[in-house]
Image (cartoon, helix red, strand yellow):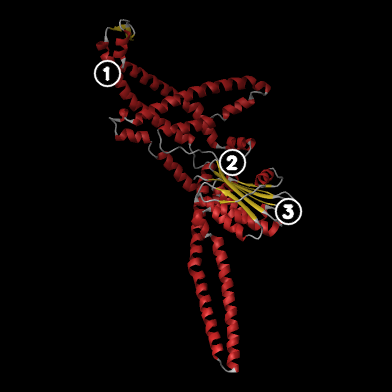
Amino acid sequence: MGTGRATAEDTGAGATGAVGAASSFLSSAEVAADSVVEAASVVGAAGGVRAAGAADRSAEVAVLAALRARPLRFPFTRDSLCCWAYLAGGAVLGLLTAVLLLALTALGLGLSVVGVGLPLLLAVALSGLPVGALERRLLRLVEPAPVPDPHRALPGAGRPARLRTRLRERATWRELAHTLLVAPPLTAAGLGLTALLLFSATLVVSPVVVQVLAPETVMLIPGHAVPGPLHALPFTAVGLAGLYLGGHAGALLTTAHVRLARLLLGPREEDPGGQVLELTRSRARLADAFEAERRRIERDLHDGAQQQLVALSMTLGLAAYELRERAGAGAGEAGAGAEAGALALVDRARGEARQALEQLRGLVRGIHPQVLTDHGLAAAVAEVALRHPVPVEVDLDLPGRLPGPVETTAYFTVTEALTNAAKHSGATAVTVHGRVVDGRLVLQVTDDGCGGADPAAGAGLQGLADRVAILRGRLMVTSPTGGPTGLRLEVPCSG
């Protein structure tokens, strides 16, 4: 476990006060989604989304592909059992949904005259949301590739905002149409097929049933008693045939389910949510490309210009040594004066080269610190804290290395917060506290400065907020007048 651990006694209190402070700044995937939707016409990603949506709908259903590959053996494969389980689960879900919606609709219509039933009717209108989510989850029994959620992610949004957004989304009404119009006949077909399979299974074991119930009379066909187990063997053959045909029928019915689910429960090219998803992925690819280019620049500066400055400093040192040797060997008064002037110029050039080398090293370290790549976030933050002009207490307890984008974003968030604390806040102490909680990196930077910071005034935190939004995280700054100023970063550690 690579951790840089110290003590921050006031970190917990600082975090609590920061969250409840008056001045706050929130950047989340919701904010990024709004800006991305507005930029959709500029970026022109709708064509890519359209192609992706068409590819999803035209992709062959996995069950149908398995049926075509092994048509004779399919009823005896695991795929057939998955189809039966999916259809049985869908039938149960459909029955429960039908009963609940009928009850809500009846109560809503009956109570609408007094206004109480309107929320119930609204619940019926939004019933496609949970039913569609359950249906997409149930599809994983038969489809290896999940049907994507067509709705926009709204982290941090309140209930009224979520409600307004969902009511404006076309996907909500497609899910309602699937729940009210498409699911009932498919549920009825699933119930019929399930009943056929159960009856066929009963016929298969009919000789055993007759033997167990003897001497009681067993009638598999009304009005026709089965005298003994041997007379029930034809029914066993009929049951086996029913199971065999039911396997093929289940595959075809499952195929219809999957295709309709892709059509009605998945994203489409005209959905803003689909455009946001594609544009967010494009932004993530651009961010990755930018990170790779930044590392290339850092490597070129480290291996190129920095080494040349080192060589220049060494050459100037040799020149200064040679001049001193000549001055010590003795020369005329005029020659000694010229050599002393040249030696002063060389020493001045060495100092300037040394200063340029230090600046270049700082620049390279700021582009991407090597310690972050080699030893991780805790070591990199500890190194920054040692060089900071304001005392910094670091308390990072991490379970090991985090994903590269998470470490990079967290590192530059800490450095930006420390830079702002040193330049603007007048702080005398800064604490950096970080933990991984429920798969999310939670990082808190708090200073005891004068507060009153405006995150929107500078581009540093705004750029970091955009990177955090790409990672589906959030960045919050709280800075009431009089302090303290707190910056809180929450980023998922999974992809």
In space, the residues marked 2 and 1 are separated at their CA atoms by 57 Å
**Residue under circle 2?**
155
393 and 436: which one is in front? 393
Mark 1: amino acid: Ala
* Location of residue 407 with respect to 211 vertically, above or below: below
In this view, which residue lies farthest toward the bottom?
A: 332
Q: Position of residue 167 (x, y in %)?
A: 59, 35
Numbered disc 1: secondary structure? helix
Q: Which mark is residue 450?
A: 3
**Is residue 463 at least partly visible in the picture?**
no
Corner quadrant of residue 429: bottom right
In space, the residues marked 3 and 2 are separated at their CA atoms by 31 Å
In space, the residues marked 1 and 3 are separated at their CA atoms by 86 Å
Tell me what residue is drawn at x 40 percent, y 27 percent.
85
Mark 1 or mark 3: which is in front?
A: 3
Mark 2: amino acid: Pro
Sort mark 3 into few (<14), some (14-19) or many (20+) by Cα contacts within 10 Å. Answer: some
* Location of residue 290 with respect to 139 vertically, above or below: below
58 and 90: which one is in front? 90
- Whether residue 70 sits left or right of residue 430 in the image: it is left
Corner quadrant of residue 365: bottom right
**Residue under circle 1?**
237
Numbered disc 3: secondary structure? loop
